[in-house]
Amino acid sequence: DPEEAAKLSALGYLGSVSPAESGPLPDPKDRIHEIDAMVAAMRFINGGQEEKGLAAFRDIVAKNPGLADAWNQLAITLEKMGRLEESVAAYKKAIEQTPALAGEFALALGSVLLKLEDYDGAEAHARLAESSNPAGTNLLLSRIALARGDLSGAERRAQSAMEDPYERRRAKIVLAQVFVRQGRLQDAMSMLDEVAREAEQNQLGPVEMLEFTRGDALARMDRPEESIAAFQREIQHFPRHRQAYANLVLVHLLTGDRAEAEATFERMVRANPEKRSYLFAATTLDELDQPQLAASWRRRAARVE
């Protein structure tokens, strides 16, 4: 609709679609083999051969740039591998090729931009989905507000997202994070227990951010051993969650276990072997008043391509 088109134009998307790209689409019979190619690429990725999967998806989009599903899967895979800037580029390409599906692609892109701390970009893309997915928009906006320290905005948006059954579980976790920041620790623990029960009843498996938020609450309740166990569970299930390692390092330092604190960041860079992880460790150690350790991590970062 005109409002969505205006938002896309403001972000520079509609002007990037050439007349040739907006003409007749290919005959599906001539491109059916590309579905087999996508299935084969996913087999590589699911089998732990991400680089082969990425190469296969890049070949697919080179041959058929209008195949938005391939761009989307390429972006998802790059994000999981920690290659966030490349993931952003792939999501943007998906939006350029298929503006009609911009809302869903934009939410995924906004989440990556949030990880890159581009809050303005994340918010602008979240708003592309306001009409097509209001609950998803509210959830992402609540996470952005939380990252900015706007607790009242985060709480309001999370409460709105909770009205949608599909987003309710993730919205509750954001709300629990708000409660932790507000010092409402028992409220946070009750909310997390509720999510854990629902996940177990519905056999959903591990829920991202649940144990991280529990660990944060327990640390503030001066229950370090339980906090350490919670952060370790988060890392076990979601090893690419760098902030969980950072919080665990903090608890180890507070309890005087410097060796385990150093070992925790070593585990983090093994699970996330990109330069950003080394710099993240250095920045975190600076904030924790560990300048010598921070300098060591910066030297190591300089040696990483």
Image (tube, helix red, strand yellow):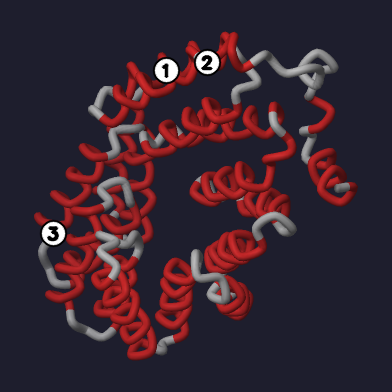
Kindly identify the amino acid type of the residue bearing the numbered disc 2: Ile
Label of residue 36 in the image: 1
| In the image: residue 70, left or right of residue 176 | right
Quadrant of residue 234 in the image? bottom left
Q: Residues within 10 Å of mark 1 (few under 14, many from 20)?
A: few
Q: Quadrant of the C terminus?
A: top left
Label of residue 32 in the image: 2
Count of number-bearing discs = 3
Assign a secondary structure to mark 3: helix
Assign a secondary structure to mark 1: helix
In the rendered image, which residue does mark 3 sit on? 258
In the rendered image, is residue 303 in sight? no
| Location of residue 85 with respect to 207 vertically, above or below | above
Residue 65 or 185: which is nearer the viewer?
A: 65
Do the residues under discs 2 and 1 have CB atoms within 8 angstroms?
Answer: yes
Q: CA distance from mark 2 to mark 3?
A: 57 Å
Residue 173 on image: x %, y %:
41, 71
Label of residue 18 in the image: none
Kindly identify the amino acid type of the residue bearing the numbered disc 3: Arg
